[in-house]
Amino acid sequence: MTTEQIKITDITTSPELLTSKSPISNPNCLPPQKRLVPPLNFSPVLPKLYRSGQPTPPTHEFLNKLKLKCVVWLSLEDPSDSFLSYIANNNIQLFTPSSFNSDFWDGVSDQTISESLEILTDSRNYPALVCCGGGRHRTGTVIGCLRKLLGWNFASVSEEYRRFAGGRVSVELIIEGFDISNVKINKEHVPDWLLR
């Protein structure tokens, strides 16, 4: 029987098709591997530094592979209960900067950015994840200022921000205006990528 001769009814009634070894019934066929699902907007930033939206239970197994030591949470709202449980069960430090603008549309304050960068420039906190609800604007602001600290030009910083957030002029102005000299870096625990 050729494929041209097979009709819809043949699929369920043909003895040849019913007795053929399908991958499902073939004992030599391996079961599918468990899939690892990254969080929304996940991306590596630097060695052992990652960014994303808030992780959900289906992404926790993926996070296990990262062996995180800390999470920098950039949102007015508390993380979900499932994410808080994951953090506690895996002995991960949760850092929440002390000051946020109370209005969601105001963006991230200079103090929040400085506090976050002080955490991220301390190698004792690595591997680390920076995240907020969607992994776009607040996370993008802090990562943009980190890129500025690394000496990236503003066009490159903006291009990376827009890849995740689609662009928001007010956020790009915050990044452009951020004074990196306000970041207190612990010289004894500087990550290798900052020494280059």
Image: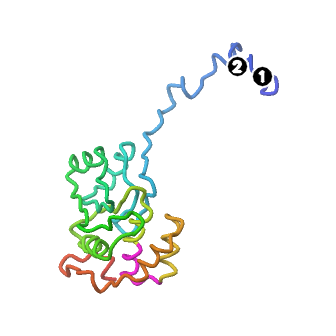
Comparing 120 with 169, the one in front is 169
Residue 152 among those drawn in magenta: yes
Q: Disc 2 designates what residue?
A: 11
Q: Quadrant of residue 106?
A: bottom left
The residue stretch that appears in magenta: 144-153
Tell me the quadrant of the picture where the C terminus can be found: bottom left
Relative height, residue 122 to residue 22 (above, below): below
Query: Where residue 162 sits: x, y (%)?
Result: 52, 69
Colour scheme employed for the rendering of this structure: rainbow
- N-term mark: 1 or 2: 1
The secondary structure type at the circle numbered 1 is loop
Q: Secondary structure at mark 2?
A: helix
Residue 128 lies, in percent from the top left, at 30, 63
Q: Amino acid at mark 2?
A: Ile
What residue would you read off at disc 1? 6
User: Which picture quadrant has residue 111?
Assistant: bottom left
Decide: marks 1, 2 in contact (CB < 8 A)? yes
10 lies above or below 180: above
- Please state which amino acid type lies under the numbered disc 1: Ile
Residue at image position (42%, 39%) is: 34
- In reply to whether residue 162 is colored magenta, the answer given is no
**Taking 178 as reference, is 111 left or right?**
left
Q: Residue at x 49, y 71 (%)?
A: 160
Residue 185 locus on image (x, y percent) = 23, 80
Task: Give the prevailing secondary structure in the magenta stretch.
Answer: helix
Pick the front one: 90 or 103: 103
Looking at the picture, tell me which residue is in the foreground, 129 or 166.
166
The label on residue 170 is none
